[in-house]
Amino acid sequence: MEDEEIYIPRPYVEVPMDRRILAFAIDFFTTAFVSLGAGSAYIVIFLLVWYGLRVVGVALNQGQSLGRWAVNIKVVDPRQRRIPGLVELFQRETIAGISSLFVVIGLANFSPVNAWVLFTPIPLLADCCLAFGDPNYRQAFHDRVAGTMMAQTRRGYSLDLKLKNLFAQSRQRMK
């Protein structure tokens, strides 16, 4: 009896890491595409679009950004059991946004001469690697600081499921 684990039900369903990565990639590349098209002011534009998409957009869209909506994920405050407030979202996205900004700076300055651009993804990787090591809630560093977590939702586009079906159909046609 003592070595049996006690089952504690969780109010939110964990999100697989591939869906979290896909949601982040959609948001990142959307923001990077807009900002890198802005010319020399790409850093300011990146931060404005990032905060617009991932803070204001999430607050107005029931915890979902464009990428999270595409794969049925939302950000929640598990202690309050609600969508995080603007302060929590701002804390969370400042850490993730600055880490992502380093990657955009590296992409903008990528050339064979600039070897330092290979180090620009390190802050983002360090931030997100904590989610792989957290067996309970899979919280990255920015989630831990803001007290948030990612949860599955039924509201969204289900892009990941549509892509899986498309790949399954293409495999069947190739046989």
Image (tube, rainbow, N blue to C red):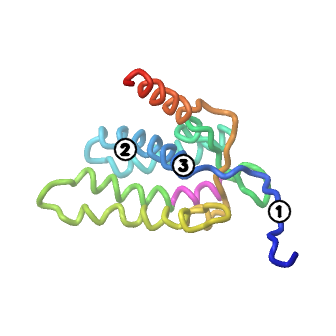
Question: Circle 3 is placed at which residue position?
Answer: 20
Q: Which quadrant of the figure has residue 90?
A: bottom right
Q: Main secondary structure of the magenta part?
A: helix
Q: Which quadrant of the figure has residue 131?
A: bottom right
As helix, strand or loop, the secondary structure at mark 3 comes to helix
Q: Amino acid at mark 2?
A: Ala
What residue span does the magenta drawing correspond to? 86-94
Q: Residues within 10 Å of mark 1 (few under 14, many from 20)?
A: few
State the separation of the CA atoms marked 2 and 3.
18 Å
Q: Could you tell whether 17 is left or right of 120 in the image?
A: right
Q: Which tag is nearer the camera, tag 3 or tag 1?
A: 1
Q: State yes or no: residue 90 in magenta.
A: yes
Q: Is residue 174 above or below residue 57?
A: above
Q: Amino acid at mark 1?
A: Ile
Q: Amino acid at mark 3?
A: Arg
Question: Circle 1 is placed at which residue position?
Answer: 8
Q: Residues within 10 Å of mark 3 (few under 14, many from 20)?
A: some
Q: Could you tell whether 12 is left or right of 163 in the image?
A: right
Question: Circle 2 is placed at which residue position?
Answer: 32
Q: Could you tell whether 66 is left or right of 60 in the image?
A: left
Q: Is residue 129 above or below residue 109?
A: below
Q: Is residue 126 above or below residue 25?
A: below
Q: Position of residue 148 (x, y in %)?
A: 66, 58
Q: Residue at x 65, y 45 (%)?
A: 74
Q: Which tag is nearer the camera, tag 2 or tag 3?
A: 3
Q: Position of residue 121 (x, y in %)?
A: 35, 61
Q: Which is nearer the N-term, disc 1 or disc 2?
A: 1
Q: Residues within 10 Å of mark 2 (few under 14, many from 20)?
A: many
State the separation of the CA atoms marked 1 and 2.
41 Å
